[in-house]
Amino acid sequence: MEKEHLEIILEDIRGKFDLVLEGHEGLRKEIRDTRTELCEKISLVDFKVDALGHRVENLDHRVGRLEIRFDGLEVKVDGLDKKVDGLDKRVDGLEKKVDGLDKKFDGLDKKFDAVAGDLKEHRADTEAHRAVFRVKE
């Protein structure tokens, strides 16, 4: 009976071993499927990272061009500041000339007033002596 009993136990062990092998086969299949899904997801993430890297490089180039343009604008603004300073100096010079002209016009006004006074006196004197100095026709 021991031999039969041993055969029964071995058959029971063989059945349990077959169940373990089936379980391992199922686990292997799940691991393969998971590996395949994971590889697909990693490929998608790699693609997205590459696309994002290209976009960042493009932005870097654009920022570089903007910096160059900004530097050019700064140079132009500096040039305009210098021109404005030059114009301020010219305007100051013109203001001084206008002030000088105002003084000259003030002097001319006095001269015109004096000439007008002289003409008024001369006319009055001429009209007062009109009868004496009249030319006959």
Image (cartoon, grey):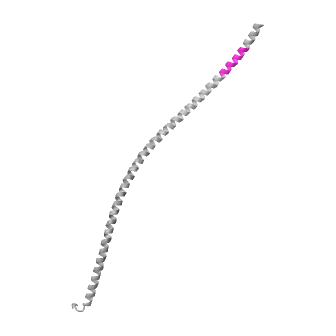
Closer to us: 33 or 136: 33
Percent position of residue 2, x then y: 76, 7
18 falls in the magenta region: yes
The quarter of the rendered structure image containing the C terminus is bottom left
The quarter of the rendered structure image containing the N terminus is top right
Percent position of residue 122, x then y: 26, 85
Determine if residue 137 is in view. no
Task: Give the side of residue 59 with respect to residue 117, left or right.
Answer: right
Q: In the picture, residue 124 is in which quadrant?
A: bottom left
Percent position of residue 19, x then y: 70, 19
From the viewer's perspective, is residue 48 above or below residue 71? above
Percent position of residue 9, x then y: 74, 12
* Number of marks present in the image shown: 0
Outermost residue toward the right in this view: 1
From the viewer's perspective, is residue 3 above or below residue 82? above
Closer to us: 31 or 120: 120
From the viewer's perspective, is residue 107 above or below residue 93? below
The residue lying at 31 percent from left, 66 percent from top is: 97
The residue lying at 31 percent from left, 71 percent from top is: 103
From the viewer's perspective, is residue 89 above or below residue 105? above
94 falls in the magenta region: no
Q: In the picture, residue 36 is in which quadrant?
A: top right
The magenta-colored residue range is 12-25
The residue lying at 36 percent from left, 55 percent from top is: 82
Closer to us: 5 or 33: 5
Tell me the chief SS of the magenta region: helix
Q: In the picture, residue 26 is in which quadrant?
A: top right
Determine if residue 108 is in view. yes
The residue lying at 36 percent from left, 57 percent from top is: 85
